[in-house]
Amino acid sequence: MSYSLLIDGRKVQGLGRIDVVDPSTGSVFDSAPRADEALALQAIAASSNAGKSWAGLGYAGRRVYLHDFANAIESRTEELAAVLNRERAFGGPRSLEWACKTAFRVWKISPSDESLT
């Protein structure tokens, strides 16, 4: 699979690639795009602007996006767990499952009171 950076809603190829290594074997199993300082600063500026728009949505508006995001993660749990486990970013598939279920519980029981935004 080919991955891109996502900056200000646009896919950016980056400046070369970084190997993703399985620490248990030392073998490269994928690559990720590399960003320099200029790309990082673009991403920071874009996230600042996006944060303002995000805040403007209020709880109800954000809830829709978070629900869709949670569903997307849940639909690819096995795939994500395999990659995260291989990178050792999580403690394996059970950790990802726990994280997804926790995220679902949090947004499902969150109050819908707009004053909490």
Image: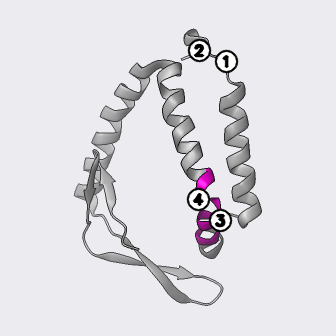
Please name the amino acid that badge 2 sits on: Leu
What secondary structure is marked by label 4? loop
Circle 3: element type: helix
Q: Which mark is residue 78?
A: 3
Disc number placed over residue 99 in the picture, else none: none
**Picture quadrant where residue 16 is located:** bottom left
Judging by the rendered image, the residue that carries numbered circle 4 is 76
Residue at 31% of width from left, 48% of height from top?
43
As drawn, the label of residue 111 is 1
Q: Nearer the viewer, residue 22 or 9?
A: 9
Q: Which residue is mark 2?
A: 116
- Nearest the camera: 104 or 45? 104
The secondary element bearing badge 1 is classed as loop
- How far apart are the two marked residues, 2 and 4, measured between alpha carbons? 31 Å
Q: Is residue 47 above or below residue 96?
A: above
Residue shown at 67%/18% (left/top)?
111
